[in-house]
Image (spheres, rainbow, N blue to C red):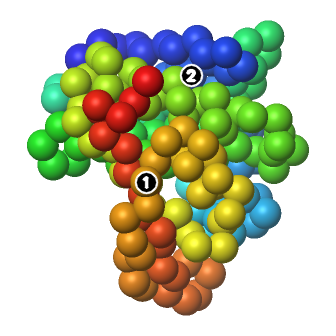
Amino acid sequence: MTYPICIASEAVTLREFTRGDADGVLAIIGDDTVTRWLSFDSRDRAQAIAMIEGTINRAQQEPRTEIYLAVTKHDDDRVIGFARIGLSGVQAGKLGYAIAATEWGRGYATDAARALITYAFKELGLHRISAAIGPDNTASIAVVERLGFTREGVLRDHVFTSGAWRDSVLLSVLAHEWN
């Protein structure tokens, strides 16, 4: 699999993480406004650095088990988000993404997810991509539904975050459904 990966989309660029991305990553994973929607609680600077280090190390392993990329604006290399497809099962992937709260509402999540899904189907030959999203995260559910995902059901008590178990809505898209 290719390393490093860089994908230019309509609004954003997806690229491999670098050790210099700590401030941008911390602005996302250290912000309760963002992490309330994610599958983990807010993290501190040391945890942000550890996340980046792990991502860089896993990106260079063969076979690669995930495509985990930083999201930046075309004219600014600072991290404003991330997009990930964890490779699981046979020709299957699990989609995840987050955008800094200061950048919400500009279409960056939709654009980044579209670019990464296209890459996964065309370059990696995946057959199915799923997303598990908290039922209260209507904005994120709308993102994947706009991209053509179909609701499959609810994963009960799927994630433990903010001191409680939370369900997830399971959605997916298949390669033959993707345009």
Q: Is residue 175 visible?
A: yes
Q: Is 38 situated above or below 67?
A: below
Q: Position of residue 45 (x, y in %)?
A: 67, 52
Residue farthest along the right direction in this orientation: 102
Residue of label 1: 150
- The quadrant in which the N terminus is found is top left
Residue 18 position (above or below residue 93) = above
Of the image marks 1 and 2, the number of the one nearer the N terminus:
2
Kindly indicate the quadrant of the structure image that contains residue 139.
bottom right
Mark 1, secondary structure of its residue = strand
Numbered badge on residue 14: 2
Q: Is residue 78 left or right of residue 146?
A: right
82 left or right, relative to 30: left
Report, in whole angstroms, how far the alpha carbon at label 1 lies from the one at label 2: 25 Å
Q: Quadrant of residue 138?
A: bottom right
Residue at 31% of width from left, 40% of height from top? 174
Q: Residue at x 79, y 10 (%)?
A: 75
Q: Is residue 121 left or right of residue 105?
A: left
